[in-house]
Amino acid sequence: MILEGRGISSGKAEGTALVLEEAFSFLGGVDPSSGKLTIDCHDESISGRILVFPMGRGSTVGSYVMLDLKIGGNSPLAIINTLAEPIVATGAVMAKIPMVDGIDISLIRTGDHVRVDADSGKIEIPNLKPVHVVTSILRNQQRVLILQRSDNVGSCQGMWAGISGYLEIGETAEQAAFREVSEEAGIDDPRLVRWGDPIAVRNEERVWIVHPFLFEVEKREIVTDWEHVDSAWISPIELRDYPAVPGLDEVFRRLNLL
Amino acid sequence: MKLKSLNPELMPLNSMPAAKGYYYIPPFWGPMFLTRHEERILDGEEGLGQQKAMEILTALGKIFDAEKLIPINSAHLSGVSYKTIGEGGLQFLDSLKGEAQVRVKTTLNPAGMDLERWRDMGVNPHFADRQIAIIDSYRSLGVQTCCTCTPYLHHNVPRLGEHVAWAESNALSFVNSVIGARTNREGGPGALAAAIIGKTPLYGLHLEENRHPSVIVEADIGDDMLSHSLLGQVVGKKLGNAVPYFRGIDPDIDRLKTMAAAMAAAGAIALFHVEGVTPMDLEYELNDLERIEVDFSDIEEAKESLTSGKEPDLIALGCPHLSEVEMREIATLLETRERKRDIEVWFCTNRRVKELCPREVATLEKFGKVVCDTCMVVAPIEDHHECTGTNSAKACNYLPGLCSQKVVCDTTKGLLELIS
């Protein structure tokens, strides 16, 4: 899968990702003489890795620490940020470390093999495959339908979800949404209210590109198929009380339900 | 719908795009316009040094969504002390040797030692050797090697409305606020890149709309230097990043410089206004602004919160560097006194000021060292000292972290009474 961002410091690199979930400071965050992380919970070295973190923070001396790492041969091969800030960006340029930002780093896991092309601003994770799915929310009188997934479905068993399914070949997301509502809820004439920008969710070696749809229905009777074991009509705010599939809250937000 | 580019400096960390995911919509960035000449520099046609500098500027321009580069008239660089930039910084500067020259007047921040009397300061010879190499590298790039954090008093004085690229938080705040020149908070490498190209990305405080006051500060405080420094501390800590508009004070140049320094160290304030004092070249709307009050009790509280030690083994004045006026004031205080206690004392200033007041220097040298080119924050004082007394809130912010010091925060008079 290719993710498009923005080149900050030019160059290309390929290697194994190390993902940090917090903003990172090179000053204090890493031992410049070894490349070992000094922050909690990480017994890892950034040396020779594709270093992935949301953004830089802290002292401007951090730029010079990156130079020290480079001189000692302990620098990362490349840097991927959600959003670049000046300290890491200038350090990357000075130390000739390729750097890309504007990447949704939630899609990258430590251990992923990553190709970084900072000249074009793109990164590639060859083992990662994007899969397009739709998630439809049915609404009736300000309440929305969520369904509990059965133990027989391929993923997220037991969790609460919208009406979801893969896009079939040759099908648009909208067509898939109507089809799934018919198959999984037995409703053939829902009224499409709106759709939201797709969201990307990482699940093992796949990235689900989830296309959110909102339908208004006239009655609350539904006929579920084997994919679901339970259903509930909830006020959108009650979603937090249900163990839901990853990203369902964001689906609600993109449909202006939250 | 896509988000407009986010400015990371203005964005609190907890509202950052979540690392765990699916909330993030990539921002939309407009392209930065480069002239054909700038493109050629970026492609390396004018040499490696200029290419590297242009790469830094375009990276910064992208981050801040700048529309283009604009010419600057001067630059001031941080990143001078070997203690902060280390071997990596030195090698980077060496890599530019013979490859680049600064195109505008460019001055330098304090180094890690007095370049002439470093032995007196107890600096080890290896450190001194590397420090001198750093200064030589900057000199070879055409940088004036005055080594001061107050170049705006003598060496490098911008004019009202001029665009400049300055690093060193006290200096850039002073030239923005007191002089009315325009600069962003540059880091050392960004300012050096701007000096080499003679341009800086157009964003932030270069734009008029970002220079308006954002909060009114009603101050009721004492007239002494320390009170003004602590006023900066209180406001910087409270506001973080803002453009304060002060009322109720009538500071002179030295009080303005210590305020600027403290505000930039305790917070990230790069521009402030003082009613009736700083230039009001633009029309500012003050109605409807939020107001805060700072009074004597806030000043006292700040002083206590910055004090962590009791018995200083080093007293260091001159953060920012002492001006001629301050040298005279201190000399007047000490003239009639005798040195009583053997505590190391540094009066930190720049070489120009030292030359301008030889009589005062002679008086001060009876009590301590008039130290040039450096200060207590960037010199390796932790090798010899554990507790530093200072009258600067800025120094109080940095001494514990950068120099492992306990700190005594007091007035100039209070500190000098410890030794005389």
Image (cartoon, coloured by chain):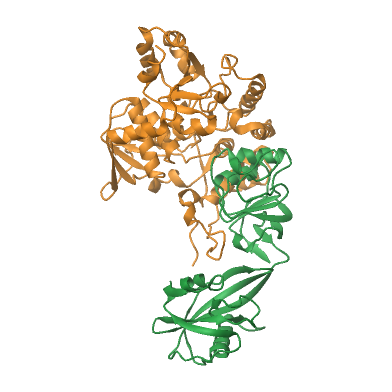
Q: Chain A: what color?
A: green
* A20 relative position to B339: left or right: right
The residue closer to the viewer here, A154 or B349, is: A154
Is residue B126 something one can see in this rendering?
yes
Q: Is residue B144 visible?
A: no
Q: Quadrant of residue B364?
A: top left
Q: Position of residue A157 (x, y in %)?
A: 61, 77
Query: A166 or A11: nearer the eye?
Result: A166
Task: Measuring from the top left, give residue B168's x and y in whole percent.
Answer: 49, 33
Query: Which corner quadrant holds the C terminus of chain A?
Result: bottom left
Q: What's the residue at 40%, 47% (across, down)? A: B210
Q: Is residue B408 above or below residue A112?
A: above
The picture's colour for chain B is orange
Vertically, is B384 above or below A140?
above
Which quadrant is the N terminus of chain A positioned in?
Answer: bottom right
Residue A217 figure quarter:
bottom left
From this view, report whether residue A146 is shown above or below residue B233: below
Task: Identify the residue shown where x is 50% and y is 32%.
Answer: B400
**On the picture, is B325 further left or further right than B187?**
left
Q: Does residue A233 lie above or below B46 as drawn?
A: below
At 43% from the left and 40% from the top, the residue drawn is B267
- Frontmost residue, A163 versus B175: A163
Q: Nearer the viewer, residue A225 or B326?
A: A225
Q: Is residue A135 left or right of residue B124?
A: left
- How far across and down, in percent of the image, does residue B36 sit? 61, 48
| Residue A155 x, y percent position in the rendering | 64, 76
Instruction: Locate residue A101: give its quadrant.
Output: bottom right
